[in-house]
Amino acid sequence: MTDQAAVSLLRWLQRQLRQPTPQREHLEAAIANDDPEEARRLVALAPFTDAQRRHVEGLISRWEEGRVRS
């Protein structure tokens, strides 16, 4: 995916979810399939801190905005 927000999201998730768990794999698949709604649903289930959640929600929002402009 060429959208910078999606690339940033993938990198962030890989750093935060270091182990290749089923949850991480589902998130990566949602990003690869250009499905921010599914990514947002999965992120809601993740054990992130408030700051992490705000950050990843911002990345998903930027990704969604980039899809609208394309």
Image (cartoon, rainbow, N blue to C red):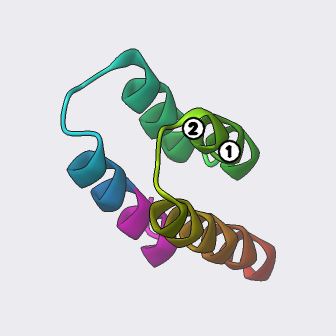
Q: Earlier in the sequence, mark 2 or mark 1?
A: 2
Q: Which residues are magenta?
A: 1-9
Quick check: is 53 in the magenta stretch?
A: no
Question: Which amino acid is tagged 1?
Answer: Asp
Q: Residue at x 45, y 63 (%)?
A: 52
From the image, which quarter does the C terminus lie in?
bottom right
Residue at the extreme bottom: 69
Q: Do residues under tags 2 and 1 come within 8 Å of each other at their CB atoms?
A: yes
Instruction: Work out how far the residue at label 2 is from the one at label 1, CA to CA, in angstroms.
Output: 5 Å
Q: Amino acid at mark 2?
A: Ala
Tag 2 residue: 30
Q: Quadrant of residue 18?
A: top left
Q: Quadrant of the N terminus?
A: bottom left
Q: Residue at x 80, y 75 (%)?
A: 68
Q: Residue at x 26, y 47 (%)?
A: 14
Q: Is residue 68 left or right of residue 19?
A: right
Label 1: which residue?
Answer: 35
In magenta stretch: residue 8: yes
